[in-house]
Amino acid sequence: MQYNTQREQMVMPEYGRGIQMMVDLAVKIENREERQRCAQAIVKIMSSILPSTTSKEDEEHRLWNHLARIAHYQLDIDYPVNIVPQEEVQAHPAPLPYPMKAIKRRHYGYLVEQALDYAKTLPEGELRDAFTKSIANQMKQDLFIWNRDSMDNALVAQDIERYTDGKLNIDLDNFTFETVGESPLQRSEGGKKRKRKK
């Protein structure tokens, strides 16, 4: 008895080992016309295994390219569609450049730093105060997620002042932080969770 783990690994397991064995046999057929007929029969079986929801042209292109891949590009036949080269199929995409930015406090993140930089450019008034309060609540929420033991209103106020070189301040005597650990929906409903109907 032979287990699948002892057999050669399939190129496209979604078609099953039966298709893989058919393709391997087709590659070994010496007569070109017979090999062509065999390939067409295999493609018909493949279309019944994985039917496509796209147009007929797209389905044919997909199936014949899959046949070429399963055959390790060794099947010498007249393909009715353009076959994507093996090098292009196996090519790995170039790694995306990751923007490395120095973050003063990683638990707040870069977006909080950007928000504070923007807030300190605003003229004094209601908009600036409202923006600062929103940022302060977000910073406390970040502290809650990062480390609940270090969650402190005074720390948030100190960090805002430190980030903005003293241009923004939070008066803790006249400011109430929102409850942390709740979604905006729960906060808007006064912290009450919706009850599911049974």
Image: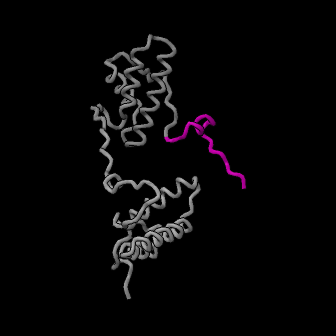
Residue 38 falls inside the magenta stretch = no
**Image quarter of the C terminus:** bottom right
Observer-nearest of 28 and 143: 28
Q: Which residue occupies 39% across, 34% down?
A: 152
Q: Is residue 11 above or below residue 59?
A: below
Q: Please state the extent of the stretch shown in magenta in the rendering.
A: 181-198
The residue lying furthest to the right in this view is 198
> Residue 60 vs residue 146: left or right?
right
Question: Horizontal and vertical percent for residue 146?
Answer: 38, 42
> Residue 178 vs residue 166: left or right?
right
Q: Which residue occupies 51% across, 58% down?
A: 60
Question: Horizontal and vertical percent for residue 90?
Answer: 33, 55
> Residue 134 vs residue 30: left or right?
right
Question: Horizontal and vertical percent for residue 15?
Answer: 47, 69
> Residue 77 vs residue 104: left or right?
right
Give the number of marks: 0
Q: Which residue occupies 36% across, 34% down?
A: 109
**Image quarter of the N terminus:** bottom left
Q: Main secondary structure of the magenta part?
A: loop
